Image: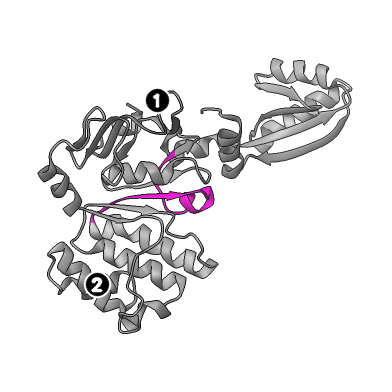
Amino acid sequence: MKSYEKNKNLVIETHNLSKNYGTTGHAKSVVHQVDLAVPEGCIYGFLGPNGAGKSTTMKMLLGLIKPSEGDISILGTPLVSSGKGVSKEKDRLSILKKTGSLIESPSYYGHLTGRENLEILCTLKNIPKKEINEVLSIVRMENQQNKKAGHYSLGMKQRLGLAGALLGHPKLLLLDEPTNGLDPAGISEMRDLIRSLPENYHMTVMVSSHLLSEIDQMADYAGIINKGKLIYQDSLLHLHEYSRRQLKLRTDNNNRALCILNENDINCTLLENYLTFSETSDEKTAFLISALVREGIGILRIEEYQKSLEDIFLQLTGKQMSL
């Protein structure tokens, strides 16, 4: 297990989770041996390009798609064991009662009001209708509850879907691209809503997205999937360590400058005509520049550079590299 898992209860845990489509010998692997570990009480960002396998994975977690192989445990209860299907129907129903979800686009009856849509869900879930006022307050749509859902904006439809997922006070919430198609204001509002759920309502949230910038602003942990394979899983803090600032230096004698920097215990690399090393204090940087000048080396350019999280994400998903 990763270090961040050691002192955490895992709400979602999978082992070798896989999904193949097609006949034997011509099967296409959509999800391949994914080992998820989602700690309790966190927001877990599930990242990947479109078509990477995010939705398929989340549907398997909900029992909507049968895995080809692998194990799934939700809230400490086995859902699937070794790809043989749902272990027990009563276990599956018990898990689903504690789980809320919004997968792909929200479902609703357009000719009914938002409140009437939620009343139907209460009946289907056998949940007291008194909970409707609470979820409407959480998603901040009390003033729109009596408006027909078909007349809602995309953002309001997403809120209605989230309200439906929150009925029954779930311990686990799975949200698939909840900000997809929203304008900047709608994205900000949805992000704030999601961020409030673990602390205010003691939920664990797994949210998928193809935008690292969105996950970076709401999640504690991240798993990155590409072409069906989980290529990164750890805290976002750990991911940020790979975007530390660096200094890039170009001189009129880079090879000699490299030797001098190394002699001063600076771990430096020469790449594309630039010397690159981790950012140091201003005093240390000034000392190094003076040392180079004293050796007769001309300083042509010095730049501060920081690799963005987007750069790291593209590097991981574009070049199939693992941190």
11 left or right of 151 in image: left
Q: Quadrant of the N terminus?
A: top left
Amino acid type shown at disc 1: Thr
Answer above or below: position of 107 versus 51: below
Front: mark 1 or 2: 1
Any mark on residue 118, and which?
A: 2
Q: Is residue 247 magenta-colored?
A: no
- Disc 2 element: helix
Closer to the chain start, of discs 1 and 2, is 1
Residue 122 at x, y percent in the picture: 18, 68
Q: Residue at x 85, y 23 (%)?
A: 294
| Residue range of the region highlighted in magenta in the rendering | 202-223
- Disc 1 element: loop
Q: How busy is the neighbourhood of tag 1: few (under 14 within 10 Å), some, or many (20 plus)?
A: few
Q: CA distance from mark 1 to mark 2?
A: 43 Å
- Confirm whether residue 6 shows in the render: no
Front in this rendered view, residue 60 or 268: 60
Residue 171 at x, y percent in the picture: 21, 52
Amino acid type shown at disc 2: Leu
Q: Which residue is mark 1?
A: 24
Q: Is residue 208 magenta-colored?
A: yes
Q: How is the image coloured?
A: one colour
Residue 90 at x, y percent in the picture: 10, 45
Numbered label tally: 2
Front in this rendered view, residue 105 or 310: 105
277 left or right of 197 in image: right
